[in-house]
Image (cartoon, grey):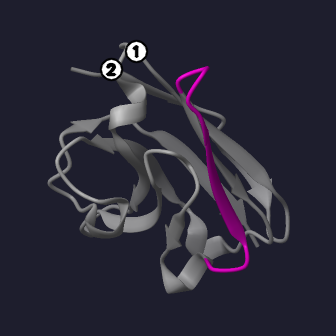
Amino acid sequence: QVHLVESGGGLVQAGGSLRLSCAASGRTFRSYAMGWFRQTPGNEREFVASISRSGASTYYADFVKGRFIISRDNDKNTVALQMNSLKPEDTAVYYCAADQRVSYLTMGVNSDYWGQGTQVTVSS
C-alpha cells in the first residue's frame, strides 16, 4: 500500500510556472507507475501525465505536451510535475496517482491509490 501527499499548488498568472510534488510512503514506490490527473467542478477527472517505474519513459496528454514535465526520484519516493506556460484552462485540482497493476501508458481514473489533491488556479 502507498500513501500519497501532493503539494505545490497555488495561484499563478497566465504564462507562469508551478511545480507540483507528490510524496509517497512505503518501500515499494519504484514498483508503481505514477501519474498526474486533474479535475474541475462538474467534470470527470482527466489524465495529464504519467511516468514509468524506472522514470525513463513519460507520457502526456496532448493539451500539456511541450508545457509540462513529469519526473520521479525513486530514492526519495517523489514524483513531480513541472508546469510551464500555464493557461487559465489549466485551473483545476491536480491529483497524484499510483498504480502497481498497469503500464504508465494505460493509467486511468481507476488507479490504485490517490492523493488528496492540490488546487492550481491560473488567472488571466
Label 1: few (<14), some (14–19) or many (≥20) C-alpha neighbours in 10 Å: some
Q: Is residue 70 magenta?
A: yes
The x and y percentages for residue 86 are: 73, 69
- Where residue 35 sits in the image (x, y, percent)? 42, 52
Q: Are marks 2 and 1 in contact (CB under 8 Å)?
A: yes
Q: Which residues are magenta?
A: 65-77
On the question of residue 17 being in view, the answer is: yes
- Where is residue 68, by image quadrant? bottom right
Q: The C terminus appears in which quarter of the rendering?
A: bottom right
Closer-to-camera residue (52/62): 52
Which residue is pictured at 18% across the width and 40% down the height? 112
Q: Tell me which corner region of the image, top left, top right, bottom left or bottom right, holds residue 113.
A: top left
* Residue at x 17% of width, y 47% of height: 101
Q: Residue furthest bottom?
A: 62
Q: Position of residue 1 (x, y in %)?
A: 21, 20
Location of mark 1 (residue): 25
* Residue behind mark 2: 3
For residue 13, side relative to residue 81 (left or right): right
Q: Secondary structure at mark 1?
A: loop
Residue 33's place in the image compared with 43, above or below, is: above
Q: Classify 6 as above or below 38.
A: above
**103 or 40: which is nearer to us?**
103
Horizontal side of 24 relative to 55 (left or right) equals: left
- 14 or 104: nearer the viewer: 104
Residue type indicated by callout 1:
Ser
Q: As drawn, is 93 to the left or to the right of 109?
A: right
| Callout count | 2
- Say whether disc 2 or disc 1 marks the residue closer to the N-terminus: 2
